[in-house]
Image (spheres, coloured by chain):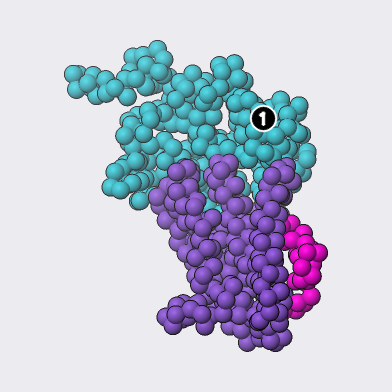
Chain colours: A cyan, B purple
Amino acid sequence: MDAQSTSAIAVDRLVKLYKGVAAVDGISFRLPRGSITGLLGGNGAGKTTTIAMIMGLVTPTSGTVTVLSAQMPSERYRVLHRMNFESPYVALPMRLTVRQNLSVFAQLYAVPDIDGRIAELAADLDLIEFLDRPTGKLSAGQKTRVSLAKALLNHPEVLLLDEPTASLDPDTADWVRERLERYCRAQGATVLLASHNMTEVERLCERVIIMKKGRIEDDDTPQRLLDRYGRETLEEVFLDVARGRAEHREAAQ
Amino acid sequence: MTGSDSSLDFSFNRVAAMVRRYWYLLRSSWPRVLDLIYWPTVQMLMWGFLQLYVSQNGGLFVRASGVFIGAVLLWDILFRGQLGFSISFLEEMWSHNLGNLMMSPLRPVEFIAALMIMSIVRLLIGMIPVTLLAVLFFGFNLWSLGFALAAFFVNLILTSWAIGIFVAGLLLRNGMGAESMAWTIMFLFLPLTCVYYPVTVLPGFLQYVAWALPPTYVFEGMRALLIDYVFRADLMLEALAFNVALFAAASFAFLKLLQSARVQGSLLQTGE
């Protein structure tokens, strides 16, 4: 078996141009099955475009994306039922109750025991008391938990998370991270997590890919990144990369 | 749970999920239901009373009882059919749910099938009370047209779906900037398909345009039935042939626009 078929996600020389401007500029990486990887980068670094191409929502200008051995986007229907995602760019219909929303998506994903799965997720994500409330009436934290429940409905083998704890208070964000971590460890799911939250990335991810202007600036374990940049937190590493201090330091050396 | 790489695979289960999603929405919101009934009722009453006035003054309309009301009701099938399709689609954009659906195993063909079913559901909710009111106020029973009504309905709903599919593609490609198309595109058909007057009223060159549009055959067929008491099966078959071509062209345009939306990256951000 080649590396592409053993990896859950394989991105190879991926380029996305919008009107001649590179949003993603020739990136390559492979995510082994069961790994949790953070995708870091400032606004406009190309994180969301990369995730959208992995999901098959955006067609690459060149290069390839393979998810669970299926070429994206041409073979996406072979694997979409084994994937799921959460993003602040999408929402669930507000007038439908939480139960109705989860039930519709469970049917779309052909979840076998829909009521049982919803009950299981509701218990796990503390949603029982909101199940019959319209989704639009929930607080931001509650909505995030519902979106997470939707993302976990089909026991995804590949989970793509775009800033899953954005706009949450620290306590709720920590609670969400704990549930995510538990799911990934239990299911052996492959996770790609785009985030601005360094605490989140440090806690959840065994590997960090840092993007800047559509390119990969660095790619390593959190500890090795800290050692290499001589920093104590990933936030400092991120700032070094974002502000170009790493290049300056390398140039000076 | 199984997957296939074909976007042409079809699952009734996924279509049912989407129909359920729209049904939940409809029943949770009485203004949405009221909206389905309100305007067709106003239209029917206005044209009905106008016809009453004209027919009381003799002439053609004494013989052609029900032509105006019939035209209004059939026009509403065409217009409301497309609007029902497009509004269900717009609900996904308004709620920012399109990304969730596009990322799910739902195939475009299943999505369209669910929208077509909902367009019929919305049409029935809106039109059944209105047709009953037409009997009550003006003694015009649309249902008495029987098989002819079925032929008219099939042709009109096919046109409305074709236009709805094309508008959905425009919305995917251009975002909410194309929303006004959903509300106004069908009005282009109002003068050209000769809803309230025969095709011969149009200037010569526009008659060619009119005869290229399937609903023209339906409205001519309706007048033949109500004025001359003749069911023109030939007109219905011609309408069906044009509808097949229109539906195929709209589906092709939708797929091309969806493909373009994937290239432009407009599926995640479906705002302005």
Asked whether, in this view, residue B124 is left or right of residue A232, the answer is right
Q: Quadrant of the C terminus of chain A?
A: top left
Where does label 1 land, which residue?
A137
Q: What residue lies at 47% left-to-right and 64% top-to-bottom? A: B253
Residue A139 in the magenta stretch? The answer is no
Q: What residue lies at 68% left-to-right and 79% top-to-bottom? A: B58
Q: What residue lies at 81% left-to-right and 64% top-to-bottom? A: B136
- The front one of B186 and B97 is B186
Q: What residue lies at 51% left-to-right and 70% top-to-bottom? A: B191
Residue range in magenta is: B119-148
- The front one of B47 and A162 is B47
Residue B124 in the magenta stretch? The answer is yes
Q: Judging from the image, what secondary structure is the residue with disc 1 in? A: helix
Asked whether, in this view, residue A38 is left or right of residue B93, the answer is left
Q: Position of residue A214 (x, y in %)?
A: 33, 37
Q: Position of residue B248 (x, y in %)?
A: 53, 71
- The front one of A24 and B162 is B162
